[in-house]
Image (cartoon, rainbow, N blue to C red):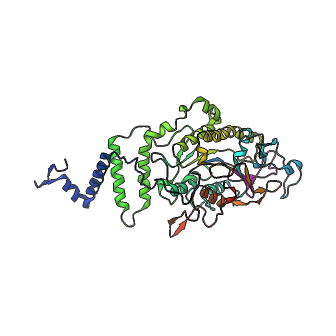
Amino acid sequence: MWHQQLTTSGDQAFSRRSALKRAGTGFGYVALAGMLGLQNRAARGETIAARNDGPLAPKPQQFPAKAKRIIFLFMEGAISHVDTFDYKPKLQENDGKPGPGGGKLVASKFQFSQHGQTGTWVSDLYPHVAKHVDDLCFIRGLHTDTPAHPQAVIQLHTGARVASLTRPSMGSWLLYGLGTENQDLPGYITINPSPNFGGAVNYGSAFLPAHFQGTRINDAGFLPNLKAQALTPLQRKQIDLVQNMNRDLQATPGAPSELDGVIESYELAFRMQGKVPELLDISQEPQSVLNAYGVKPGPAGSFARQCVLARRLCEAGVRFVQVRQGGWDHHNNLHKGLIANSAATDQPTAALLDDLGQRGLLDDTLVLFGSEFGRLPTAQGPDGRDHNITGYPMWLAGAGVKKGFSFGATDEYGIHAVEGRMHTMDLHATLLALMGLDHEALTYRYAGRDFRLTDVGGIVAREIMA
């Protein structure tokens, strides 16, 4: 059909191929070449979706490591560690007395007890997670730079010490370094991200190409701007044409990488239409699985639904999944708030560890549980605790970390990190190392300098590695 004769106003005949070659300084001919290439690949049984040579294609780890993906269970607002996972007998003994830095010490109103062969202390707020202490690796000497939530949350997610300095998120760096295991899905998904405390900055790609940014969904599996409909042949041709034209443009000197990211994102959105709705439908799970996670209707079941989605997404090849539970900023109503939030997160967290383990996914999945900082052991008002950035814990489980292990410690009241001190940058360096990435070598050239997640810091805590 490409040789059918056309007639101009001057009755000069020429072929469609000739028209494409002449029009727009040959731009149409480039499109034709791309489409013919697609036809040739289709004849060989190859599809664009199956190709694995794009910027999101899997990349080798920089050095051998067990972890291939991360699930980050983010307790936004700062969980009180002295009421949950950081038992302080001195605090219990000195209830009501002046604290080392001023203020009145307030003992935890929750009962702590030892669990597992390691005898790890956990409060009765987390009875289900307590059963897993022999599988957990506690990092107990964390500290960060600022007591303000927006800055601390942004620093935890992106490494930026100043909130106004937009930097790529941790998940974006992982996707940039390792690619994704499923070309029909985003490599980085954030569930119920906070509209506050930095918002989209926390899962954005900043100056990295757009295809490395996080994809936002909610706990009901809703993906904004995605319609659950099959890709038509015409849509497939359109997106293939534009992508091939874009690749030709990218081959020219000085071509903007941002354009490549935008086109990749649109192409991924087309591919997702057929696969994502089914993947995000947790009603397909057996009732026994949903019961194990504690899935229930309404807000009280939000975190449980997120955990089920996280397992399904990781099983499908997503590289980084963040699950969020907000409402931990207990300047008041501390004890009722802790009871409610712990009840919402305890059973689902334990079930996620069980589920990943039973499916063999915990062998190459790293689970991180924690907040942007901790809380003080002293009173704030009648029933609250203020922010504490100088010492607090997180825990890890799964691929690459020691089981039943604690690294570092806070002082006798849980205020300052005194052993195994780890800054947020050290945490980032360690997570990247567990994923087989060198935080000093994982860089991106922008505005005349090489940027990295850990900026000019970061020490890997090799003591926690199995």
Residue found at x 49% / y 54%: 179
Q: Is 163 displayed left or right of 232 in the figure? A: right
- How far across and down, in percent of the image, does residue 83 sit? 78, 46
Quarter-of-image position of residue 132: top right
Q: Residue furthest bottom?
A: 448
Q: Is residue 194 visible?
A: no
Which of these two is toward me, 32 or 354?
A: 354
Looking at the rendering, the stretch of residues picked out in magenta corresponds to 368-394
Could you tell me which residue is drawn at 32 percent across and 43 percent down? 234
* Relative depth, front residue between 120 and 291: 120
The overriding secondary structure of the stretch rendered in magenta is: loop
In the rendered view, tell whether residue 460 sits above or below residue 229: below
| Rendered residue at 55%/55% (across/down) | 174
Quarter of the figure that contains the C terminus: bottom right
**x, y percent for residue 143:** 71, 58
Is 349 in the magenta?
Answer: no
- Asked if residue 374 is among those painted magenta in the image, a careful observer would answer yes
Rendering coords of residue 159 (x, y %) = 61, 59
**Image position of 449 (left or right of 336):** left
Q: Which residue is located at x 35 percent, y 44 percent?
A: 235
Outermost residue toward the left in this view: 11
Q: Where is residue 9 shown, x and y percent of the image? A: 13, 53
Front-most of residues 406 and 106: 406
Callout count: 0
| Quarter of the view holding residue 124 | top right
One can see residue 214 in this view: yes
Check the image and report above or below for 261 versus 296: below
